Amino acid sequence: MKKVNNRRDFIKTTALLSGMALVDPIQTFAFSPKPTMFEIKAVNGKYELPALGYAYNALEPFIDAKTMEIHHTKHHQAYINKLNEALEKEPQLKQIPLEALLKMIQSLPDSVKNTIRNHGGGYYNHSFFWTLLKTNTKPSAAVELAIQNSFGSMEQFKKDFEKAGSGLFGSGWVWVINQMGTLKIVTTANQDNPLMDIAEHKGKPVLALDVWEHAYYLKYQNKRADYLTAFWNVLNWDQVAQNLG
Ligand code: MN3
């Protein structure tokens, strides 16, 4: 499958799409023409469940094996299935990397707009989230410095992050985004993310935490704050350093 990885190719591809309002793609993509983290593409027209790269019990006791298994094989898979169903309705969108689709939610055909927002978002967010989980890692000097510069101290950062997570009403995500070198904590509802053109706060995601109840309820029940505190034991700081770079 042809890679759509530069602006000219993207515009060419976009121009071929039928049924799409052609807003100025340069304008839409001006803030980030390059893939920001990893490029997720449909393989033979289908998105697939990515491997976790670790065992379901690897994050015990902080995130339990049963939660990880259900979260990965049921929830994540369900987002993928719905996304694939939507793309069958608009097959011309299959050649566009998922990240690019998320950056153009407003311009997507009405028949798939909400599904790509919710299920494409869900697919992307979980794929990103799994890479951020690992026990026994430490922030690099560069990460420490970026956090100090943006939040004053690591302690303050963790406090602010947990507060944002506790304060988010309903289902959603807590993010750290990179806005021109400054890190910022933001939240999104449901499966929205900061890459989306419809996001209130846009930026390159550096880290993310799923605060939907399905991410913690089996172990923590209604105690979201405990899950937020436990998160620091399983945050993969090596991946954070990579996302920051
Ligand atoms: Mn989830």
Image (tube, helix red, strand yellow):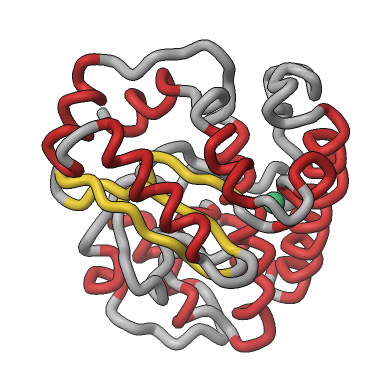
Residue 130 horizontal side relative to residue 48, left or right: left
Residue 136 horizontal side relative to residue 175, left or right: right
Q: State the residue in front, 130 or 59.
A: 59
Residue 150, placed above or below residue 145: below
Residue 117, placed above or below residue 139: below
> Where does the N terminus fall, quadrant-wise?
top right
> Where does the C terminus fall, quadrant-wise?
top left
Q: Where in the figure is residue 201, as x and y percent of width and height?
A: 31, 67
Residue 149 horizontal side relative to residue 19, left or right: left
Q: State the residue in front, 181 or 102.
A: 181
Q: Quadrant of residue 144?
A: top left
Q: How many discs mark residues in the rendered view?
A: 0
Q: Where in the figure is residue 228, as x and y percent of width and height?
A: 55, 43
Q: Where in the figure is residue 243, as x and y percent of width and height?
A: 35, 32
Residue 220, placed above or below residue 63: below
Q: Where in the figure is residue 227, as x and y percent of width and height?
A: 62, 41
Q: Quadrant of residue 190?
A: bottom right
